[in-house]
Image (cartoon, grey):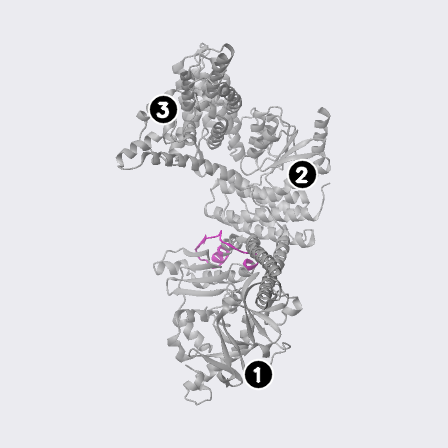
């Protein structure tokens, strides 16, 4: 079971994801509202996985993921976003994220989580 | 699948509401300044969040609508299709539709409304082709988009800027070292070209290419220092201030300074961190101390990690040297020389502006040594708070840090950023008699202030909790019970004290027991007092929870004013102030309609058309201001316009035409009394009835509602200059100070705020006019309303000879209420009556008194309606008297 950090500026999405993950037996160790807060919490909490939104007020998800990756190159980050812009998706890939999945695509999220679990 | 529970519905509704509440005022701002990118971005994000939430819940209509608006915003922020008036109109309509959809969803849990009309309208906006978010062509390096418009998507731009800056910094640090290998330089430049090409910035691309060909010739292997700095200069020029030409004109984009704010913030954090753990580094002892060395080592290890992360290579270098010296000392127990470490510390303070101030602030006037040098270079430019000019200096200081090239000479610039004591001391030399130490500490304060701001910004957002109003209501009910209990105990205490004095006086108990009783009584009294105090605080606290800033109420008005003004072709500037004044939520809800009425009237009847305004020499844009402030236990809301003002003569003419005032009284009416006439039922000064302001049925309702909430209305107006309407509203509804009276066996509560005076009367004081009882009081004739005759079943004699009168006033109506006894004043908690009881006008609610009995709270407005007949009668008499008729009861007139 994974320790997860959720970064999303919408309290609605944070709650939903938290509920979803906790129902599946994972621990949500923290939630953050933007990339910077996510970065700060990452340092404190060292989660196994970060679920990162892209469009956020303040520091966006791409920049946040970059900050995390720079300080903690082994961080595991997966983007969940409605953004479909290939530039952004490319960028996300370049950063070294595990994937870029749609907000509602829980199946794929759990597939990634499963993979992470196996690797551990 | 996720849990579809009640909480989720609630979260969803709140999420959409909150986003709409942010979106609408921003949209209003955007309409004024359509080019403001940051507002556009906020609007975009709001729609994006709504889309996300709606999508999640499966509300496809709402999601689609949000998606379309998001697209409009996206195209606008890319400069492809600026929002025009038609677009704003449609988006405002969409906001309304969102609200309706939300209500729809809240009540039906599904979307039943039709959105297709508006979707069509959005599509037909002809703002250019709709951007498909799903399959936009990928712009890759290979395709080199030479004629494609630059993708100025803010997100991308930021990434681009970030990358450029990092490349630039790489290059700079590379060139800082002697003899930079051309191949590496070339590779970095090519990277820059790739990034630039990716973004489609033609001009920059060609310039960077030119630099590459100029400097990186095949024949050279190593770049000379002079070439290197020339190259840096050229790059700086290109990237530092790139002016992009587009359809809107020119936009200046700087690719080097974007990260700065973030950098600065990180720098502050680093300094704070340094301050927290690095004090051992600033305290260099004269004799070697083992403790100090280990503290230093510990601090250095942590600081090195941070500095490394921040790319402050110079700091890392100094720290490493420090570490080495310490290691030398510890291993070979070599000679300890404080000067070595002091010089290292000075190096640190030179590369970290603000560091030494921080420690000096901690230590008072300690370590002033290293300012002597810098003082000489300082230009007397004292900035108590960082100003933008100084930020450039700090920027370069930070750049220097990152480069690892900080030179001692830079300290001059650095010191200009954080005002040094030296500046202030030098200034103070001119100001005779200024205490130097004092000035010094003030300087420290300003630095402190800066950090406070940073700290408060980061913490403020996480300190609110969203609570269901129902829970607060429950809490309030419990507190109300407690308040009742408190009064009961106060009464118990009084009874006990009476009992004790009887015992003491009558010597009923032996002295021993009497003393014991006295002790118990004293203890009890103390506890009752303590309880009272705590309950008071608790009550106050809970009331405050119910209070919200009036912005919740005011937020809806900018949009309303915009719509009305647009419809009437008027130009109105709407100004809101005091929006953070707190007011009870329930009262706020009751104010919605009255305020809407007043604002509507102000725009419709008050503010003139732009042409008219210009003709009479006013600015063509009218001004409507709404302001809130607290005055004691009341909140005053003022609505003022700079329109034509109320026409006194017109009001008088209309009012006498309608028979609202007797002609002879006109001369003696005060300004306010005349203006109050506009609140009379059936009054309207508008020559033509418009569909916006209605036909004058509005204002009397406004006044009634406000008085119902325990408030009052004041009107001030100057003809031709404008009108101000002041609403005075009690802070909270749930608890009132009441005068408790008895009518027969029934206790009743009269709100103290309406009570003018109380006095004893006998039947001799009462006269009868046309079936009404009247009394004279202070040269005024007042109707007497015996509560016993209005409310039956109280067991009170209807024609008592001696009783009490309570003179009350709400609004303009004044009367005396006849009651059997006055009990006292008390704070009472209003509990609403059941619906079937509310049908009976006369009571505003009930409350439980200290002794546990129930008292009814009078609705004075309703009770005084009873005396309206009298007022009307009095007017008739006046009229007849004016005609010379001799009528009985004429003596009531004064």
Would you name the residue on which mark 2 appears?
A: A18
Q: Mark 3 lies on which chain?
A: B
* Residue B563: in magenta span: yes
Q: In the figure, is residue A109 to the left or right of B626?
A: right
Mark 3 near mark 2, Cβ–Cβ under 8 Å? no
Q: How crowded is mark 1: few (under 14 residues within 10 Å), some or many (20 or more)?
A: few
Marking on residue B2: none
Whether labels 3 and 2 belong to a single chain: the reply is no
Q: Which of the two residues, B109 or B59, is positioned nearer the viewer here?
A: B109
Q: Quadrant of residue B674?
A: bottom left
Residue B230 in sight in this render = yes
| Quarter that holds the C terminus of chain B | bottom left
In this rendering, is residue B77 above or below A2? below
Mark 1 near mark 2, Cβ–Cβ under 8 Å? no
Q: How crowded is mark 2: few (under 14 residues within 10 Å), some or many (20 or more)?
A: many
Mark 3 near mark 1, Cβ–Cβ under 8 Å? no
Q: Mark 2 lies on which chain?
A: A
Q: Which chain carries label 1?
A: B
Image x and y of residue B442, in percent = 37, 36
Image x and y of residue B259, in percent = 48, 30
Q: In the figure, is residue A109 to the left or right of B373?
A: right
Would you name the residue on which mark 1 appears?
A: B799
Would you name the residue on which mark 3 appears?
A: B369
Number of numbered markers: 3
Q: Which of marks 1 and 2 is in front?
A: 1
Image x and y of residue B374, in percent = 34, 25
Q: What element carries label 3?
A: loop
Residues in magenta, as a range: B561-588
Q: Which of the two residues, B438 or B41, is positioned nearer the viewer here?
A: B438
Q: Which residue is drawn at 37% across and 64% down?
A: B720
């Amino acid at each position: 079971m994974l320790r997860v950090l959720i970064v999303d500026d919408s309290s609605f999405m944070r709650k939903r994801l938290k509920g979803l993950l906790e129902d599946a037996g994972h621990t949500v160790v923290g939630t953050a509202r933007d990339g910077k807060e996510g970065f700060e919490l990452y340092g404190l909490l060292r989660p196994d996985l970060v679920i990162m939104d892209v469009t956020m007020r303040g520091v966006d998800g791409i920049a946040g993921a970059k900050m995390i990756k720079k300080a903690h190159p082994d961080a595991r980050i997966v983007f969940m976003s409605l953004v479909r812009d290939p530039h952004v998706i490319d960028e996300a890939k370049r950063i070294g994220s595990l994937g870029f999945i749609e907000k509602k695509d829980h199946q794929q999220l759990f597939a990634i989580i499963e993979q992470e679990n196996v690797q551990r | 699948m996720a849990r579809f529970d009640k909480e989720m519905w609630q979260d969803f509704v709140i999420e959409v509401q909150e986003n709409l509440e942010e979106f609408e005022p921003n949209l209003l701002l955007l309409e004024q300044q359509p080019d403001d990118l940051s507002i556009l971005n906020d609007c975009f994000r709001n729609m994006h969040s709504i889309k996300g939430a709606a999508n999640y819940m499966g509300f496809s209509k709402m999601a689609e609508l949000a998606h379309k608006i998001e697209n409009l915003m996206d195209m606008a922020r890319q400069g492809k299709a600026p929002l025009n008036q038609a677009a704003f109109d449609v988006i405002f309509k969409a906001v309304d539709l969102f609200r309706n959809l939300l209500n729809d969803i809240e009540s039906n849990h599904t979307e039943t409304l039709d959105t297709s009309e508006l979707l069509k309208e959005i599509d037909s906006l002809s703002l250019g082709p709709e951007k498909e978010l799903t399959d936009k062509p990928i712009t890759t390096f290979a395709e080199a988009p030479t004629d494609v418009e630059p993708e100025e998507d803010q997100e991308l731009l930021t990434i681009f800027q970030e990358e450029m800056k990092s490349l630039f910094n790489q290059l700079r640090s590379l060139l800082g070292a002697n003899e930079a290998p051309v191949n590496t330089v070339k590779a970095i430049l090519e990277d820059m070209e790739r990034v630039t090409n990716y973004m489609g910035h033609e001009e920059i691309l060609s310039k960077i290419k030119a630099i590459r060909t100029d400097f990186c010739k095949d024949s050279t292997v190593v770049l000379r220092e002079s070439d290197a700095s020339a190259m840096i200069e050229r790059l700086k020029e290109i990237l530092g201030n790139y002016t992009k030409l587009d359809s809107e004109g020119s936009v200046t984009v700087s690719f080097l300074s974007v990260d700065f704010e973030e950098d600065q913030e990180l720098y502050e954090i680093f300094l704070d961190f340094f301050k927290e753990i690095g004090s051992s580094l600033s305290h260099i002892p004269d004799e070697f101390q083992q403790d100090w060395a280990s503290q230093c080592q510990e601090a250095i290890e942590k600081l090195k990690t941070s500095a490394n992360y921040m790319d402050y290579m110079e700091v890392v270098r100094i720290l490493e040297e420090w570490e080495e010296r310490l290691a030398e000392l510890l291993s070979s127990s070599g000679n300890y020389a404080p000067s070595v470490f002091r010089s290292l510390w000075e190096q640190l303070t030179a590369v970290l502006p603000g560091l030494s101030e921080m420690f000096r602030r901690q230590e008072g006037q300690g370590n002033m040594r290293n300012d002597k040098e810098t003082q000489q270079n300082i230009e007397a430019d004292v900035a108590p708070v960082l100003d933008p000019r100084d930020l450039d200096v700090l920027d370069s200081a930070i750049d220097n840090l990152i480069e690892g090239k900080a030179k001692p000479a830079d300290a001059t610039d650095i010191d200009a950023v954080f005002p040094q004591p030296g500046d202030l001391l030098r200034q103070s030399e001119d100001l005779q008699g200024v205490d130097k130490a004092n000035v010094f500490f003030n300087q420290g304060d300003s630095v402190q202030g800066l950090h406070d701001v940073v700290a408060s910004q980061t913490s403020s957002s996480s300190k609110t909790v969203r609570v269901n109003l129902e829970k607060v209501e429950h809490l309030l009910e419990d507190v109300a019970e407690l308040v009742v209990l408190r009064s009961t105990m106060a009464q118990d205490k009084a009874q006990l004290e009476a009992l004790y004095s009887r015992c003491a006086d009558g010597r009923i108990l032996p002295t021993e027991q009497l003393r014991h009783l006295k002790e118990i009584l004293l203890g009890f009294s103390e506890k009752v007092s303590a309880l009272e105090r705590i309950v008071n605080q608790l009550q106050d606290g809970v009331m405050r929870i119910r209070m919200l800033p009036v912005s919740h109420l005011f937020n809806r008005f900018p949009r309303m004013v915009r719509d009305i003004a647009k419809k009437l072709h008027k130009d109105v500037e709407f100004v809101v102030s005091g929006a953070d004044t707190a007011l009870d939520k329930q009262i706020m809800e009751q104010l919605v309609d009255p305020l809407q009425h007043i604002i509507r009237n102000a725009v419709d009847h008050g503010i003139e058309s732009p042409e008219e305004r210009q003709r009479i020499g006013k600015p063509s844009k009218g001004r409507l201001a709404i302001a809130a402030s607290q005055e004691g236990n009341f909140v005053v809301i003022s609505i003022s316009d700079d329109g034509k003002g109320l026409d006194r003569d017109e009001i008088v003419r209309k009012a006498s035409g309608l028979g609202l005032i007797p002609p002879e009284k006109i001369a003696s009416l005060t300004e306010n009394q005349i203006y109050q006439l506009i609140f009379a039922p059936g009054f309207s000064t508008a020559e033509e009835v418009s569909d916006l302001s209605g036909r004058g049925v509005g204002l009397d309702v406004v006044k009634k509602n406000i008085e119902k909430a325990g408030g009052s209305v004041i009107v001030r107006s100057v003809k031709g200059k404008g009108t101000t309407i002041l609403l005075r509203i009690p802070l909270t509804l749930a608890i009132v100070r009441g005068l408790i009276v008895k009518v027969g066996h029934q206790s009743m509560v009269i709100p103290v705020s309406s009570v003018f005076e109380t006095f004893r009367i006998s039947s001799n004081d009462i006269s009868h006019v046309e079936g009404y009882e009247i009394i004279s009081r202070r040269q005024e004739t007042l109707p007497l309303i015996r509560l016993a005759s209005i409310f039956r079943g109280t067991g009170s004699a209807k024609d008592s000879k001696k009783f009490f009168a309570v003179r009350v006033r709400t609004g303009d109506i004044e009367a005396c209420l006849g009651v059997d006894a006055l009990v006292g004043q008390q704070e009472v908690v209003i509990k609403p009556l059941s619906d079937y009881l509310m049908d009976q006008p006369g009571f505003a609610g009930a409350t439980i008194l200290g002794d546990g009995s129930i008292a009814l709270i009078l609705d004075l407005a309703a009770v005084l309606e009873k005396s309206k007949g009298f007022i009307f009668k009095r007017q008739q008499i006046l009229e007849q008297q004016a005609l010379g008729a001799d009528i009985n009861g004429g003596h009531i007139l004064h």
